[in-house]
């Protein structure tokens, strides 16, 4: 009934209200975990051409960002996502069956940008059976998060293998890559620093940005997701801008003359057509 009233009386539609959430509303580019060691932007803010492009009235809609989490079973993939999306942590392990999926909406520089986060349980026993699903899971990823358990050094090597596998399905594009050490709360200060040194070196080799986090304590979880969302947003908008520039250079430059509509030529052409005898 209220919508009918609005239609009939031509009342303006009510504006969409977006509640302000400091976790997901970003105005600046958040810093990397280690600003001295990242293959991505070290700037304190978004690229100037991005802000300029966003001011333009005509721009295409931003595509949702596909993020995949890879890594051994029980390294803490589900726990990281649950901590960020629901601010909850479960100490009892519940294995993910198949693919888990979360959607998180950000508002960056006043624009809505959604993250489609998925994490997949690749069962070794059923590897063949799941191969086709795995392809769909891996393909067209905008961001790959390779995770390892900081308290299990061997899981770092597994993370490298998982990443290589995921990259094989994404050869046509260049996804953003993060290497994330989980369960930092389980380590002593010395163990933590030593593990970070090793993993930081691995991240440089992999051309990935490194983060240590803990889903249990919440350490760096929000900062990590904010950085990920902001970098993915920046990449998405800059790609859009590049595509726009490419189509603009391909189109022939129209002169002022061709842009003006000549009424006289139009009618004289139309009358000639009629004289030549139209079939209809
Ligand atoms: N101490 C600690 N345990 C964690 C942390 N993250 C996950 N876990 C535990 O590790 C187990 C596996 O976590 P889960 O997220 O399900 O792993 P996944 O298989 O990679 O998704 C669970 O028992 C979690 O409670 C963490 O940051 N600290
Ligand atoms: Mg899981």
Image (spheres, rainbow, N blue to C red):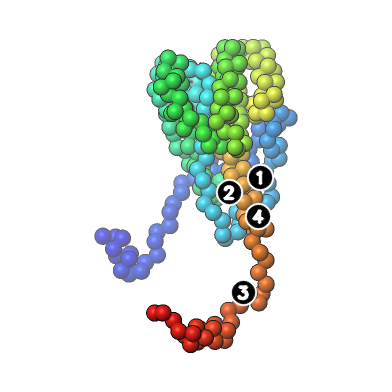
Q: Is residue 23 above or below residue 125?
A: below
Q: Position of residue 81 (x, y in %)?
A: 48, 29
- Earlier in the chain: of badge 3 and badge 4, it is 4
| Labelled disc at residue 245 | 4
Q: Is residue 220 above or below residue 58?
A: above
Position of 34 with respect to 148 (left or right) is right
Query: Between marks 1 and 4, how big is the CA–CA gap?
Result: 19 Å
Q: Residues within 10 Å of mark 2 (few under 14, many from 20)?
A: some
- Where's residue 234, x and y in %? 62, 44
> Can you tell which of label 1 and label 4 is closer to the viewer?
4
In terms of image quadrants, where is residue 125?
A: top left
Q: Are marks 1 and 2 in contact (CB under 8 Å)?
A: yes
**Could you tell me which secondary element the residue under label 4 belongs to?**
helix
Q: Earlier in the sequence, mark 1 or mark 2?
A: 1
Report the disc number at residue 109: 2
* Residue situated in front as seen by the camera: 115 or 247: 247
Q: Position of residue 64 (x, y in %)?
A: 50, 43
Q: Which quadrant is the C terminus positioned in?
A: bottom left
Q: Label 3 vs label 4: CA separation?
A: 21 Å
Q: Residue at position x 62%, y 46% from top?
A: 239
Q: Could one spot residue 108 in this view of the protein?
A: yes
Q: Residue 245: percent from the left, percent from the top?
A: 65, 55
Query: Which of the two discs, 2 and 4, sits closer to the camera?
Result: 4
**Label 1, on which residue?**
46
- Mark 3 and mark 2: Cα distance apart in space: 35 Å
Inter-mark Cα distance, 1 to 3:
37 Å
Q: Which mark is residue 259?
A: 3
Q: Please tell me which residue is depicted at 67% across the width and 21% down the height of the picture.
A: 202
Marks 3,4: beta carbons within 8 A:
no
Q: Is residue 8 left or right of residue 154?
A: left
Dot 3 crowding, Cα within 10 Å, few <14, some 14–19, many 20+: few
């Amino acid at each position: 009934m209220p919508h009918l009233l609005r239609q009939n009386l031509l009342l303006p539609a009510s504006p969409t209200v977006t509640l302000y959430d400091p976790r997901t509303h970003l105005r600046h580019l958040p810093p990397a975990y280690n600003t001295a060691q990242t293959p991505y932007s070290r700037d304190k803010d978004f690229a100037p051409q991005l802000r300029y492009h966003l001011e333009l009235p005509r721009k295409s809609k931003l595509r949702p960002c596909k993020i995949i989490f890879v890594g051994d079973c029980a390294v803490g993939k589900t726990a990281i996502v649950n901590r960020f999306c629901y601010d909850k942590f479960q100490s009892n392990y519940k294995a993910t069956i198949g693919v888990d999926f979360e959607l998180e909406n950000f508002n960056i520089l006043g624009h809505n940008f959604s993250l489609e986060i998925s994490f997949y349980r690749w069962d070794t026993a059923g590897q063949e059976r799941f191969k086709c699903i795995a392809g769909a899971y891996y393909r067209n990823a905008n961001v790959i998060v390779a995770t390892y358990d900081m308290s299990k050094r061997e899981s770092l090597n597994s993370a490298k293998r998982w990443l290589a596998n995921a990259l094989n399905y994404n050869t046509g594009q260049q996804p953003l890559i993060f290497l994330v050490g989980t369960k930092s709360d389980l380590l002593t200060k010395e163990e933590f620093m030593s593990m970070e040194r090793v993993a930081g070196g691995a991240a440089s080799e992999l051309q990935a940005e490194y983060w240590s986090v803990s889903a249990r304590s919440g350490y760096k979880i929000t900062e990590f997701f904010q950085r990920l969302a902001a970098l993915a947003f920046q990449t998405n908008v800059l790609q859009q801008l590049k595509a726009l520039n490419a189509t603009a250079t391909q189109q022939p430059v129209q002169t002022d003359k061709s842009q003006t509509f000549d009424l006289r030529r139009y009618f004289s052409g139309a009358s000639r057509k009629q004289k030549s005898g139209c079939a209809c």
